[in-house]
Image: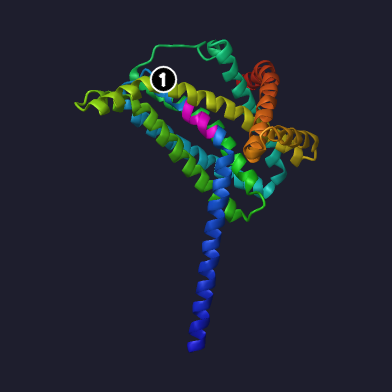
Amino acid sequence: MTSGLFSLLDDIAAFAKLAAKSIDDVSVLATKAGSKAAGIVIDDAAVTPRYVVGLAADRELPIIAKIAKGSLKNKMIILLPGALILSLLAPWVITPLLMAGGAFLCMEGYHKVMDLIRPGHHAHDDEADVTPMTAEELEAAQVASAVRTDLILSAEIMAITLAGVSESPLWTQALVLAVVGVGMTLVVYGVVALIVKADDAGVALAKSGAGFIRKAGRALVLGMPYFLKTLSFVGMVAMLWVGGGILIHGLHALGVHGPEKTVHHAAEVFAGLLPSAHAFMAWLGAAGIAAVVGLIVGTVVDPLVKYLLQPLFARFKRKA
């Protein structure tokens, strides 16, 4: 009986070690997937604050909470099951879908570049049908618009995550997708809440009696517009390099190895300019080339979407 008990304890210990290793594997895979989706996360954090512009200050946090709730629904109810079904039934579709999402990111990055060059050059497309709304209707419309945008960005995050764990067991894929989905949502909308309320915090500090704290509050208020511009620029560049990188790696996965080999060789040459920081310079070179590729792809994809895909979708919608 004693030997049986020790055997049972050994089995329990072995199972505990296996479970711990599995948890470690999930956390490592989730961290890697999250880092690959950094460009989308930065852009999401940069874009979301605009959805509370013009609304009452006391409604800012509730609106962000509603958007975060919608984002979680997008990831957990729509995208996660869909990703698992694709992985189980049609894993060959993952890379093409990922590349399609990469092309979308390139197009969005191209739009942002064009906004820097010619501010508002495509804004009229979104403002064609403007009707008066009550505060409640405006809030609901802003939340709905933000959740729709989040669905696209979340789909890309989940696709990047799935591509990184496609060789893992299905339960591991599900756990990693869930961890990344929840984690990204908390990070993005937690940061957005801090950004949106930074002005209020700065004003409160500026009204305090202490000299240093008052100066810090004024600096926070004055610095937030520059911070948002910097964040938006970083998000733009990140979208281009992530989108371009997805396309280059996707071609490699489909058997077209030339672009990735060319990028790797060029990055190594660039890294040779500063051997003491070889790894950083190699990454910077590869990211820079991927961003240029992303901008070129975005320039090509934008008219295709505008003059071909959107009219086709509109015609299909009218028939339906």
- Vertical placement of 279 versus 293: above or below? below
User: Would residue 320 be seen by someone viewing this image from the given angle?
Assistant: no
In percent of width and height, residue 159 lies at 61, 40
In percent of width and height, residue 69 lies at 42, 37
Q: Residue at x 67, y 38 (%)?
A: 275
Numbered circles on residues, count: 1
In which quadrant is the C terminus drawn?
Answer: top right
Disc 1 residue type?
A: Pro
Range drawn in magenta: 40-46
Which residue is farthest bottom? 1
Location of residue 318 by image quarter: top right
In percent of width and height, residue 200 lies at 30, 25
In the foreground, 121 or 35: 35
Disc 1 marks which residue?
225
Location of residue 171 by image quarter: bottom right
Crowd rating for badge 1 (residues with CA inside 10 Å; few <14, some 14–19, many 20+): few
- Asked whether residue 74 is drawn in magenta, I would say no
In percent of width and height, residue 52 lies at 39, 23
Is 41 displayed left or right of 213 in the figure? right
- Vertical placement of 173 versus 315: above or below? below
Helix, strand or loop: magenta stretch: helix
Q: Residue at x 68, y 19 (%)?
A: 299
User: Would residue 110 be seen by someone viewing this image from the given angle?
Assistant: yes
Location of residue 211 by image quarter: top left
Is 165 displayed left or right of 193 in the figure? right
Which residue is farthest left? 209
Mark 1 element type: helix
Q: How is the image coloured?
A: rainbow
